[in-house]
Amino acid sequence: MASQLVMYEEEFHKINAVCDRLTKDANAKVVFLVDKNGQLISAAGQTQHIDTTSLASLTAGNVAAMGGLAKLIGENEFPNQFHEGAKDSLYMTIVGSRVVLVVIFDNRTSLGLVRLRIKKASDELSKIFEALSRRAEAPGAGSPFAEISDADIDNLFSE
Amino acid sequence: MSFINYSSREINCKIVYYGPGLCGKTTNLQYIYNKTNPETKGKLISLSTETDRTLFFDFLPLSLGEIRGFKTRFHLYTVPGQVFYDASRKLILKGVDGVVFVADSQVERMEANIESMENLRVNLAEQGYDLNKVPFCIQYNKRDLPNAVSVEELRKVLNPRNVPDFQAVAPTGVGVFDTLKAVAKLVLTELRKGGQG
């Protein structure tokens, strides 16, 4: 079973910075980082008109389905996916077999440039996530919820 | 597998509604969607066939409020109940924090309930989870139908471990929120233990 994903302030800022830079460098509309279980980690660019929560969950569903297909034909996974639309296109890359980097772009840029920039961002993100998992495994990194009481939980459901 | 973000002070958990085809998993989510405040919920996404059978999953994000300064969000998913969608069902269990088994109370669906429960156990095990250890609730749905089996009987067959169970009529909402609250509580209690989700 995969361990819980815990995000700390320092890594969170680094991740956001990578996503912001990728948006600019690739001339993309939006960049998302989604964990494979469907949780949105970071979003950069023109996210105002996008339902980011739904996007994260559908991305994870899509990656999971393609992963299932890959295994059926003897591949481990399909690390890159490209979907071309009439106006906007979407590129997905699996990073560190744990998270998915999603880039949405239009004809102001090119697939080649997007792929090139993703490669670099993906390497940087891999390193950050390695550091994160080391940190989560370190002794003393217990659950932040260790101190919550039954009353805290009950309060959530009192109407 | 929950996601805790210290920076944005959020905690996200995943709950999956499991059960045989046409037992009312999607109806549970639809009722929750219709009855919650717009500011606490996101869009209900249904990936279904033309005849409204779930093809891949339904998804509903829900905010429950704050615990000690952390916003708690629950992502509710349903699986496709039909037997031949097993490959898709497995995928949706990835990273699950809590499971609700929706049983169809009708006598002619007893076998389907048992088969689906066994399928849940096997599919969870494939993902590295033990059904006896994950936060788990059972809902006996369709209690209003004349051919419903007695609750005692359903309990005997489906709930030998005596996990929290609820009677429900999902289209009218009977038991729907009770079930959700119970599983959410179990998930949060598990988090407190710092368990492996």
Image: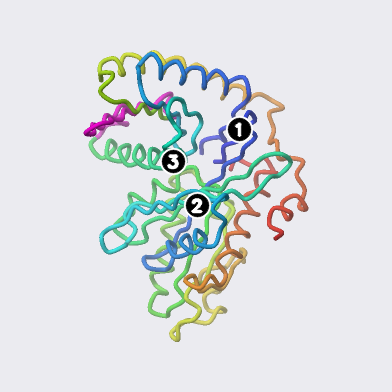
From the viewer's perspective, tell me whether residue B43 is left or right of residue B54: right
- Cα gap from disc 3 to disc 1, whole angstroms: 20 Å
Quadrant of image for the C terminus of chain B:
top right
- Cα gap from disc 2 to disc 3, whole angstroms: 16 Å
Amino acid at pointer 3: Asp
Kindly identify which chain the residue marked by label 1 belongs to. Answer: B
Kindly identify which chain the residue marked by label 3 belongs to. Answer: A
Check disc 2: other Cα within 10 Å, few if <14, some if 14-19, many if 20+. Answer: many
Helix or strand or loop: what does disc 2 sit on?
A: strand
Q: Nearer the viewer, residue A92 or B8?
A: B8
Check disc 1: other Cα within 10 Å, few if <14, some if 14-19, many if 20+. Answer: some
Visual colour scheme: rainbow
Residue A63 pos. (x, y %): 35, 37
Q: Residue at x 74, y 54 (%)?
A: A155
Residue B9 pos. (x, y %): 65, 34
**A93 drawn magenta:** yes
Q: To which quarter of the image does residue B196 belong?
A: top right
> Which residue in the protein does label 1 denote?
B5
> Which residue in the protein does label 3 denote?
A51
The segment highlighted magenta reads: A74-99
Say if B36 sits above or below A6 in the image: below
- Cα gap from disc 2 to disc 1, whole angstroms: 19 Å
**A41 drawn magenta:** no
> Which residue in the protein does label 2 denote?
B76
Residue A120 pos. (x, y %): 39, 13
Residue B189 pos. (x, y %): 68, 49
